[in-house]
Image (cartoon, coloured by chain):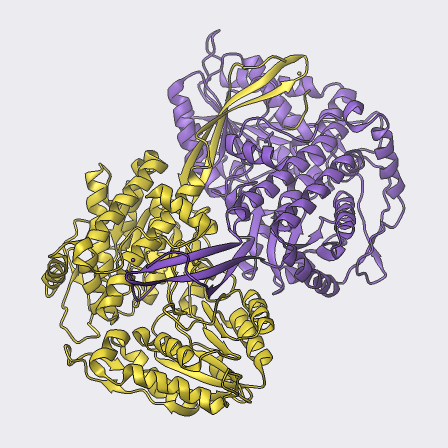
Chain colours: A purple, B yellow
Amino acid sequence: MLDKALSAIETRGYWSPFAEMPSPKVYGETASADGEAAFKAHLGKTFELDQPSTGETVGAERSPFGVALDIKYPKADSDALIQASIQAQKQWRAAGPQAWVGVSLEILSRLNRASFEIGYSVMHTTGQAFMMAFQAGGPHAQDRALEAVVYAWDQLRRIPAEAHWEKPQGKNPPLAMQKRYSIVPRGAGLVLGCCTFPTWNGYPGLFADLATGNTVIVKPHPGAILPLAITVRIARDVLREAGFDPNVVTLLATEPNDGPFVQQLAVRSEIKLIDFTGSTQNGTWLERNAHQAQVFTEKAGVNQIVIDSVDDMKAAARNIAFSLALYSGQMCTAPQNIYVPRDGIRTPDGQLTFDEVAKALAGAVEKLTSDAARAVELTGAIQNEGIVARIAAARALGDVLLDSQTLTHPAFPEARVHTPLLLKLDARDHETTFTREWFGPIAFVIATDSTTQSLDLAGSIAQEHGALTLSVYSTDDAAIDAAHEAAIRGGVALSINLTGGVFVNQSAAFSDFHGTGANPAANAALADAAFVANRFRVVQSRVHVAPKAAPAEAGQTA
Amino acid sequence: MLDKALSAIETRGYWSPFAEMPSPKVYGETASADGEAAFKAHLGKTFELDQPSTGETVGAERSPFGVALDIKYPKADSDALIQASIQAQKQWRAAGPQAWVGVSLEILSRLNRASFEIGYSVMHTTGQAFMMAFQAGGPHAQDRALEAVVYAWDQLRRIPAEAHWEKPQGKNPPLAMQKRYSIVPRGAGLVLGCCTFPTWNGYPGLFADLATGNTVIVKPHPGAILPLAITVRIARDVLREAGFDPNVVTLLATEPNDGPFVQQLAVRSEIKLIDFTGSTQNGTWLERNAHQAQVFTEKAGVNQIVIDSVDDMKAAARNIAFSLALYSGQMCTAPQNIYVPRDGIRTPDGQLTFDEVAKALAGAVEKLTSDAARAVELTGAIQNEGIVARIAAARALGDVLLDSQTLTHPAFPEARVHTPLLLKLDARDHETTFTREWFGPIAFVIATDSTTQSLDLAGSIAQEHGALTLSVYSTDDAAIDAAHEAAIRGGVALSINLTGGVFVNQSAAFSDFHGTGANPAANAALADAAFVANRFRVVQSRVHVAPKAAPAEAGQTA
């Protein structure tokens, strides 16, 4: 698996070791039912975890689908958890790269077997429909984790354990030294999870830390603890079985509004690595205050689509509508701003006016979301009330092209389901509106002077306000070239003419870099060499040994 | 050269492409005389550089050897220089990794040919004796530069320019995409040089930036401009000849006390990379304020020697004395604290008391520095008056084991030559004295309760106050193991029982990591993957293409 993964990150073609379809053939005939039962067994219980605890419990997760969760987690004192993490370090560090990577791979293969249980737990904390919760929360998150592990291994394996250094000294015997290079992990890592993709966004930091020999404290978002609690328990089982102190990985479950608590923890001198997914405000605070740590952040961004010209408006609209509806725009990669020239666009069937393009987009979203039973499998539910309030506030921002509807979920009558809101804005009047992120099912069709202006906005907004995705539709090579330039300026991944089965929100491990680290939406990419290379350091020693060669010029300063 | 360098960083044996001996056979019969003449031709002149300038000149370098320099440099407005740097970026970026690396290698080979001119210029700005100025300022600095280039290449070459991605879709045709990966350099780098090793410490950042496609503004320390001015001119010549805008590399020469000016420059939004060598105060300021940039710093540290037991006290003392005298302790790697158990140490000839060890060290330094003509070739001169004042202030810190002497340089009667000051301290009483850096020819022999305490101090001081080197003398395997643990705790490179021709101050490119990035003395190592991997980012694009394979399972979220 490691060899294939090494090859995958260098060739970057399609590769995935973890089957994304929740198929009984792959996962076993009873896997789905067993996973659902395992999930249900957590409800109304205290999650068992044999780690340092105050004896109290915490937990206030609420299912966006309206299912009562009432799960409690052991409360941990952060001092005690840090102490346990430090305590676990010496033995874990001494085990070395092969053990770190081996244990990481074993954890991943067990997480894969728990994909249904994790899928249901992701579904009922994030609001994702089951299929996405299974895939993004299970195998795709495992892919991203493996990607972090293999990037770590790719860097670790380049550092020799030892070297014989022999420097000629002219007619005198050479100087000879034996050198030893010890990989020294940074220490304790802190993974700060988010409430929409707790595993997909949490695993890269967790596994990058583990595979480079660090210990990890996992602090889930208070709204999505269960998927990471299951993950931590599995990790601890594997560590224990392999003879390590399970406190190499610990869980720090908290109540809502844990901001001040997290800030205190994040600047502790023992915390050497922080991986964060969440708001720009919190991420920037960490970058500027947690000086003692290497800080990796994924924050807010403004994802954009530039429509210049199309071969097939229907196919383009269908693809875009899917991206807008998928998990109700609650993906960090979901598009928000759709730029269309005020004078309309070219198609093989002649010019389409701005309003016709806007109508095609609104119509495609409407079509996708008109049947509640089918729609909810795409939109899932809204993770929290703040997003619902944002939809209401956004209605006043411009002309409503398509209003957000409340849908009744056939299986979960209490589910918080809202379809996308589509507004019409003008680049001339509304720049302060669309240069910020409106997280949730909110998108703007924005009239511009020209594709040149659209691309200029796309590049500059990505550069200044951040973006994870940019999408362009054009039949004109010059416009595509200009879109490449805008993407480079904005430091953002570009998708070109998506009209089929690939959507701009999708980012495939081993092939697509998720985030670039080159604009404010993220200070790192998932995953690359920079994501792992500073999670460990090398401490060397050298001692004289007998030369192997005969004598040949010497110097004074090495 | 690149292939050999790639192999060298992975095997880490001895390798150097640039001859360290100033031999006529390698560098040419007239190289030394030509280099000296080239250096002398700069004196009393304005250094010519065809880059944006205000028309005024700056420059106030003074030779520690007392030679009148009176060199002026074109003054540059920082706005104009940043503008020129930005202007040069687009074409330089588009040239791609092979061009960046090729141009870097050509600059290096020309710098090598200028080693004598650079050697003399390093000598007369830093105070290094000629042999060190030639080696450390010339070939060894070039080695470190090449090391940064090859680390950059090693990372760049792993990113494919493009990929065919093809995902099976069961019975449907596969999804196929063509992906393009563009290396996008960060932008403009700023290299902030130091006054003791302007090229050796300046080149890694300069060449890491260049080899990853960035443009670079080189701001030398006001006390050591000439070596970097010559470097910048050579780089510009190569860039121009290769068809690039020479403003890819520019020089920003300043007057003394340029601190506030540098701070303003360092937080400019256009400056994306900063490489700094200098004081902890300035380095920490950059780390905490230049949020828009990737910041690489080498700052102050407390280098330490632990003497537990020896096979040959004379040989150990001779080796340590050389390290203390070499360039008058003005190397960032020079030892300062020498711990010796209060009860003395074991030798094959019986126990030596603390005072006997201290006397052996003082005697060895005295012997090395007693003959002025020979001593000055080792000590060089003191770079600035601040260091001379520090020697005077240090005399009051403890009992003087060996006083610092003023020597008259036979060739340069005005040279500022001071031999090492050796003081006796006690770990019980003087901890606030020896936990900070006393930069210059100042060292402490410190009485401890035991080797255990010595190693504990060494580890904790490195961890808390920073260190680039740690050295241990012991004939006991358990003590050596404990020294390894202290080195790991302190994140500092360890040398063991140096009694021959290798000195703790020496750090060999391609084999020794200079700095670890794991303690406060440096936030990066020279050089490793982490030193280069975040100097560029990858921006990708993807577009549908025809599948190559026949149909096979599909999913929703990549």
Q: Give the position of the C terminus of chain B as an image quadrant.
A: top right
Q: Residue A483's image quarter?
A: top left
Q: Residue at x 14, y 54 (%)?
A: B28
Classify residue A481 as left or right of residue A277: left
Q: Residue at x 21, y 50 (%)?
A: B234
Label total for image: 0
Q: Residue B455's image quarter?
A: bottom right
> As displayed, is residue B431 above or below residue A442?
below
Q: Residue B215 at what x, y percent from top left?
A: 32, 46
Foreground residue among A305 and B14? B14
Q: Residue B129 at what x, y percent from top left?
A: 24, 71
Q: Residue at x 71, y 52 (%)?
A: A219
Q: Residue at x 44, y 87 (%)?
A: B358
Q: Residue A276 at what x, y percent from top left?
A: 62, 49
Q: Is residue B190 visible?
A: no
> As displayed, is residue B25 above or below residue A121?
below
